[in-house]
Amino acid sequence: VAVLYFDNLSRDTADAYLADGLTEELITRLSEVRRLEVKSRFMSQRLRGQPAEEPAILGRRVGAVFLVTGGVRRSGKRVRVNAELMRAMTGVVVWSRQLDRTDSDVLDIEEQLAHEIATGITGELLPNEQATLTRRLTHDAVAYDLYLRGNFLANKFTEPDLRAAIKLYEQAFARDSTFALAQNGIASAWFFLADDWVSPRDAYPRTRRAAERALALDSSAPASAQLVLPALTLDYDVGRAEAVAERALVREPREAWSLFSMMLVRLAQARRSDAADLALRAWDADTVSFLSALVVAANLGMAGAFDDLARFLPRARLAVAEEVIHGWEGVLLYGRGDCAGAAERLREEHQVFLRAYRGLRRFKGDAS
């Protein structure tokens, strides 16, 4: 099943976070029903802003039997959500629902939609699936709204947005000290700030602290993978990092974060072939993911597989900003012997791995 991004039907574009947040939390909840193979949010992002296509074509493009579509409209304190579940091959609507609630009932809307969508596909939910889909993330509607706003900013992957997201997550946690996902959001934001904008010695301890808090509150929180890099970079403990990565993979074997964490361990063990395989699996799991694109490109660059990198960059353009692509083009130029061209491309690059190329002093006798 693929949950396509719900349309923001509100007059105020500032409400886009609500439509995006509802979509992404539906994807997360449905993914916890093990009988369902739910396409990642990054797969759904491929279809945003593109001309409408027949359901059968959409289904083939994302590899889904079922499609979920919908829209969200906020008016004052009221929120109206329309949703449909259809068979991609025939376009037949299996289930549809319109919910009209107050904006303090967003969690109820999300839970009801997830339950009815899963039932529409499976026919009948098992008791453990019922419990999973009705598990309440927080009982504070304002905290949840702050969390969704934080996610919306964090997904932009810029320094100002990541820092703003952290403040929103902290406000959410201040309202509900049992809200594990707020701490998970903090851990993730510091993880992405590290290296490029914040010293790892400052950022990774914050990542670790927040991830450990999230797991202490909820052992099922998706924070295990975020503990791998601190174990490698702060503790130099490959064995501990491997154990954490293995736990993450057991819990979420198809999740890009889990694959990414084990890839880092394999790099630390100098098992580059295994690392490259994990990177490609992460890309397959989260095609058009900012993180997965960088992981694949980094592995190809480190391995000196410049022809493969050249073939990959057009695909990476679907996931990352053009200025990041320029950095990888600089790596490609360097690998092909054009140091002057590489330096020009890399000059404004923020990624530490790419900046390192500027420090190299010898390539085919060229000191530039």
Image: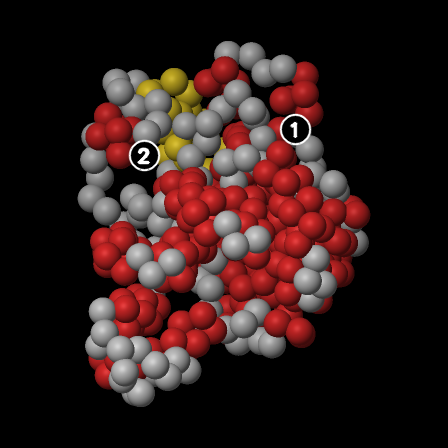
Q: Amino acid at mark 1?
A: Thr
Q: Residue furthest top?
A: 123
Task: Kindly identify the residue that appears in the image at 49 percent across and 24 percent down.
Answer: 36
Residue ID at (23%, 53%): 311
Determine the residue positioned at 66% across, 74% down.
Answer: 201
User: Could you say which quadrant of the image residue 313 lies in?
Assistant: bottom left
Mark 1 closeness class: few <14, some 14–19, many ≥20 residues within 10 Å:
some
Q: Position of residue 88 (x, y in %)?
A: 30, 24
The correct choice, above or below, for 328 with respect to 310 in the image is below
Callout 2 secondary element: helix
Query: Tell me, what colour scheme is on the image?
Result: secondary structure
Residue 12 in sight here: no
Residue 314 location, quadrant:
bottom left
The N terminus sits in image quarter? top left
Q: Which mark is residue 30?
A: none
- 62 and 298: which one is in front? 298
Q: Is residue 120 above or below residue 26?
A: above
Q: Position of residue 238 (x, y in %)?
A: 66, 54
Kind of residue sitting beneath label 2: Val
- The numbered mark at residue 132 is 1
Tell me what residue is drawn at x 71 percent, y 51 percent: 240
Total marks placed: 2
200 left or right, relative to 296: right
Q: Is residue 306 left or right of residue 168?
A: left
Q: Is residue 311 visible?
A: yes
Mark 2 residue crowding within 10 angstroms, few (<14) / some (14–19) / many (20+): some
How far, Cα to Cα, is label 1 from label 2? 26 Å
> Disc 1 on helix, strand or loop?
helix
Spot the residue most to the front.
365
On the image, the x and y values in percent for residue 128 come to 68, 20
Q: Return the residue at label 2.
A: 62
